[in-house]
């Protein structure tokens, strides 16, 4: 074998492991140093690259310290580490931003600022949707840019957006794909292949137009009533609020166990020493805390003030939810390896040993700041929404700014304008703007489309088959759990092994839910049972015998009734496991305009 044949055999046999796809709520970013004049030797170039990247890393630390001093991240913070990708040394990071899209744009802003301060670096940033900067500018990008060929083409350099054009301009679909080394070579040696469009750039960076002022507007401060220990922890490190809110938001029966007992003596954050303090949230986190209906747990019964004083009650209710979130965060076994949980437990141990002292009422009143932001941005009704979407705010209501804020209004109007453009685009298909049709005629369509739906040897439709591992992965991402199929199975086993007997509670909930469903006519059990007992049997009188087909139809009707009953049973069990939280069963019934009665406990 020749050396070329050996190389071909090696490449075909030992293929590189494909890079795992990004989760939907994560952003990945890389910074490369590309000098316009390469160093004389490989060693010198590697040393220069590392030295320059360390400078960029220090600048990034200074930027985050300056711009993000009091910032609260929804899930993970921006960070950069020196790594190697495809043999190329770079700075790289990945941040899980959860439900806070603004966290992603804070990161884009910091990366763009870094490229302005260091003229010889190039930045690549992607999220679960791929090249999301192109998606932002989808109405202005050239038709040849398709998702299949977009990888490694979109870069940020000296504050500008640069797109690597194909080697040859064609009238048909572009199929040329770029590897990272190829893209790096083009950036250094072929500047003529870089597309810089002001229109595309403005659209891609539209969300950054109000930065850095926007950074502070991503947060919300509110005065709430919480246990003194909770106030101590949040004063030590305000970022603890985000994991606590998430623990509350994705709670399940395991996490809720410490709150079910009527004895509050075992709680870490007992509801018997409450103080009023100002807590800084992300806007998303505050909305998650405020919006969820959460029955007062047994351990907090009688601890909230009367609803006559609405301000005091709202502060106490929000504080109760946050304190419960902190309790669940520290109790739940799946959180024990989190850095925030370990830190909080160490601080609480210091309090128990006397190394740390809880703040007094005088300390809180005299030395702690108490900002309390307006909550009007939470108040949105359908009439205001429709008015703002049309850009026709009028009268006192519009002048008062009752709907959201100026940024929300502008973004909504922009979304609607884009949607109208899409609807008016005759070339757009169900999957989006169909640029491929600009180059391919109908004659190119495969005539065997009818055979595309594969059916395996057992007659199962592969597209409609159930993939257990994929379902487990989706559940993990939705619940914010570690990315491992074993973790979700372990969680289910823990739920199944819950020693508490909920039989009577399920029976009571079943009776209440059945009454609700009977009113909607969904089950109509009496009518179906009457049909089973009299419908087909009655029509057979006078006949010598029923045919086999009629017997089969009777069996199918009976099976349908069993399916409906089992469906109701499964829905009830799912609702019970939600413990008052949002979940699949509750969301599905809500879509059917059916609001379930609240359980007596969380």
Image (tube, helix red, strand yellow):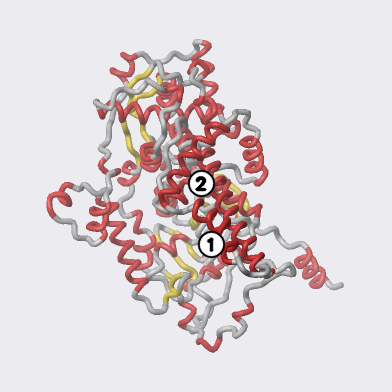
Furthest toward the left, the residue is 395
Q: Name the residue rendered at 29%, 18% in the picture.
A: 365
Whether residue 78 sits left or right of residue 314 in the image: it is: right
Dividing the image into 4 quarters, which one contains the N terminus? bottom right
Q: Which residue is mark 1?
A: 37
Left or right: residue 75 compared with residue 12: left
Viewer-closest of 143 and 506: 506
- How many neighbours does mark 1 have within 10 angstroms: few (below 14), some (14-19), or many (20 or more)? few
Residue in the image at 60% along x and 34% along y: 334
- Can see residue 513? yes
Viewer can see residue 68: no
Q: Is residue 536 above or below residue 511?
A: below
Lateral position of residue 578 relative to residue 378, left or right: right
- The front one of 180 and 560 is 560
Q: x%, y% of residue 257?
A: 54, 28
| Residue at 35% from the left image edge and 23% from the top image edge | 304
Residue 403 in the image, given as x and y percentages of width and height: 24, 49
Q: Position of residue 541 (x, y in %)?
A: 60, 65
**Among all residues in the image, which is located at the extreme front?**
542
The residue wearing badge 2 is: 95
Question: Which-is-in-front pick, marks 2 and 1?
Answer: 2
């Amino acid at each position: 074998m020749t050396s070329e044949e050996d190389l071909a055999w090696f490449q075909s046999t030992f293929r590189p492991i494909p890079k795992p796809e990004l989760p939907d709520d994560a952003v990945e970013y890389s910074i490369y140093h590309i000098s316009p004049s390469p160093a004389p030797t490989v060693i010198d170039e590697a040393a220069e690259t590392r030295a320059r990247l360390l400078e960029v890393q220090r600048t990034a630390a200074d930027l985050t310290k300056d711009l993000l001093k009091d910032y609260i991240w929804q899930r993970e913070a921006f960070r950069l580490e020196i790594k190697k990708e495809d043999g190329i040394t770079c700075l790289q990071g990945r941040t899980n931003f959860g439900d806070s899209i603004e966290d992603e744009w804070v990161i884009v802003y910091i990366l763009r600022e870094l490229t302005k301060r260091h003229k010889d670096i190039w930045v690549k940033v992607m999220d679960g949707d791929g090249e999301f900067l192109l998606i932002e500018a989808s109405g202005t990008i050239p038709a040849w840019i398709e998702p299949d060929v977009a990888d490694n083409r979109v870069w940020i350099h000296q504050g500008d957006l640069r797109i690597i054009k194909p080697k040859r301009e064609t009238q048909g679909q572009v199929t040329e794909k770029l590897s990272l080394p190829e893209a790096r070579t083009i950036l250094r040696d072929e500047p003529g292949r870089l597309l810089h469009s002001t229109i595309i750039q403005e659209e891609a960076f539209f969300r950054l137009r109000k930065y850095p002022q926007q950074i502070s507007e991503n947060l919300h401060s509110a005065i709430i009533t919480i246990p003194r220990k909770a106030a101590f922890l949040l004063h030590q490190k305000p970022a603890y609020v985000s994991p606590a809110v998430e623990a509350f938001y994705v709670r399940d029966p395991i996490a809720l166990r410490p709150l079910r007992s009527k004895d509050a003596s075992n709680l870490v954050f007992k509801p018997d020493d409450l103080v009023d303090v100002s807590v800084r949230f992300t806007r998303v986190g505050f909305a998650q805390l405020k919006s969820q209906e959460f029955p007062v747990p047994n351990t907090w019964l009688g601890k909230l003030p009367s609803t006559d004083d609405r301000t005091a009650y709202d502060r106490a209710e929000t504080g109760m939810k946050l304190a419960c979130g902190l309790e669940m965060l520290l109790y739940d076994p799946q959180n024990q390896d989190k850095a925030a949980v370990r830190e909080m437990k160490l601080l609480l141990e210091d309090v128990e040993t006397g190394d740390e002292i809880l703040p007094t009422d005088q300390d809180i009143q005299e030395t702690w700041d108490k900002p309390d932001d307006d909550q009007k941005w939470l108040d949105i009704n359908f009439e205001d929404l429709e008015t703002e979407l049309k850009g026709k705010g009028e009268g006192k209501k519009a002048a008062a700014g009752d709907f959201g804020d100026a940024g929300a209004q502008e973004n909504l109007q922009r979304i609607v304008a884009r949607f109208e453009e899409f609807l008016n685009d005759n070339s757009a298909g169900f999957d989006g703007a169909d640029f491929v049709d600009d180059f391919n005629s109908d004659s190119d369509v495969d005539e065997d489309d009818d055979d595309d739906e594969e059916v395996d040897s057992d007659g199962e439709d592969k597209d409609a088959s159930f993939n257990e591992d994929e379902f487990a992965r989706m559940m993990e991402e939705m619940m914010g759990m570690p990315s491992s199929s074993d973790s979700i199975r372990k969680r289910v086993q823990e739920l199944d092994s819950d020693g508490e007997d909920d039989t009577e509670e399920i029976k009571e909930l079943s009776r209440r839910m059945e009454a609700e469903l009977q009113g909607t006519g969904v089950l109509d059990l009496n009518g179906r049972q009457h049909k089973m007992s009299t419908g087909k049997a009655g029509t057979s009188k006078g006949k010598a015998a029923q045919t086999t087909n009629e017997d089969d139809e009777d069996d199918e009707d009976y099976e349908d009734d069993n399916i409906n009953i089992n469906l109701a049973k499964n829905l009830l069990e799912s609702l019970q496991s939600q413990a008052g939280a949002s979940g699949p069963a509750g969301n599905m019934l809500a879509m059917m305009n059916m609001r379930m009665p609240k359980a007596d406990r969380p």
